[in-house]
Image: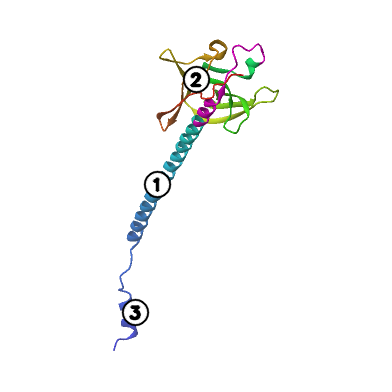
Amino acid sequence: MKTGIENRENSGNTPGFTLLEILISITLLVIVLGAAYSSFFSVQRALERFDSVSLKYHEARTALDIMRREIEGALVRNPRSTDENSKDKASFVIKDRDVLGKNTSALELTAFTFKGSNLSKVSYFVGEKEGRLDLLKKEAPAGIQSKDYTMEIIEGIESFSVETLFNNKWVKTWDTADTAKLPDILRLSIEFDDNGRKVKLTEYAKPRVGRTL
């Protein structure tokens, strides 16, 4: 029969963790948790970049689609009209501009907008804000005195270009005051940065209404 003294002596021989083993375990745990947190934040940053680029793709594609629809519904002034006021009511103009040292375009047209059957004066152009280029849109009802409004379409683009095919060559200027007709086909392009890689989306549009006022 074992005495109480023997039991206490045996309990003192029970193996346990030394201070060195505990420190090593804590160090390994910190390394594993650090790697896990690093991976988590890397994935989170990648998802945020993907969301940002995905949004810009969506905005650019939507803007090009709206422009195409408005161009298809564009109207032009009747060259035989004697009403000088009609010149301001229906025109189609493409301008070649320079913003922050980059070639950009400005598009002005009179069209039935995608919102409905209302005839509007619409213009797309590039503006500068805080050192970046933004694609802007200005719209106002055609033929009446009304305050126009400007909205931001896409923030932080590289370029916006509008070209039309003339004599088998793509040109960047057009004015119905000189041509008295709408262009046959247009090429619209929006370029933006995708994590250091330049991406250009392009849409082709043909005026289909083509009626004169």
Q: Is residue 80 magenta?
A: yes
Task: Answer few, some or many: residues within 10 Å of disc 3's Cα (few below 14, many 20 plus, some between 14 and 19).
Answer: few
Q: Amino acid at mark 1?
A: Ser
Task: Answer few, some or many: residues within 10 Å of disc 1's Cα (few below 14, many 20 plus, some between 14 and 19).
Answer: few
Q: Kindly report which numbered mark, 1 or 2, lies closer to the viewer in this rendering.
A: 2
- Tell me if label 1 and label 2 are in contact, CB under 8 Å: no
Q: Earlier in the sequence, mark 1 or mark 2?
A: 1
Q: Kindly report which numbered mark, 1 or 3, lies closer to the viewer in this rendering.
A: 1
**Front residue of 36 and 68:** 68
Task: Answer few, some or many: residues within 10 Å of disc 2's Cα (few below 14, many 20 plus, some between 14 and 19).
Answer: many
- Under tag 1, what secondary structure? helix
- Tell me if label 1 and label 3 are in contact, CB under 8 Å: no
Residue position for label 2: 104
- Under tag 2, what secondary structure? strand
Residue position for label 1: 38
Q: Amino acid at mark 2?
A: Thr
97 relative to 142 in the view: left or right: left
Q: Amino acid at mark 3?
A: Arg
15 to 58, vertically: above or below: below
Q: Earlier in the sequence, mark 2 or mark 3?
A: 3
Q: Position of residue 61 (x, y in %)?
A: 47, 33
Q: Position of residue 109 (x, y in %)?
A: 57, 21
Q: Quadrant of the C terminus?
A: top right
Q: Quadrant of the N terminus?
A: bottom left
Residue position for label 3: 8
Q: Which residues are magenta?
A: 65-85
Q: Residue at x 32, y 74 (%)?
A: 12
Q: Kindly report which numbered mark, 2 or 3, lies closer to the viewer in this rendering.
A: 2
Q: Is residue 26 magenta?
A: no
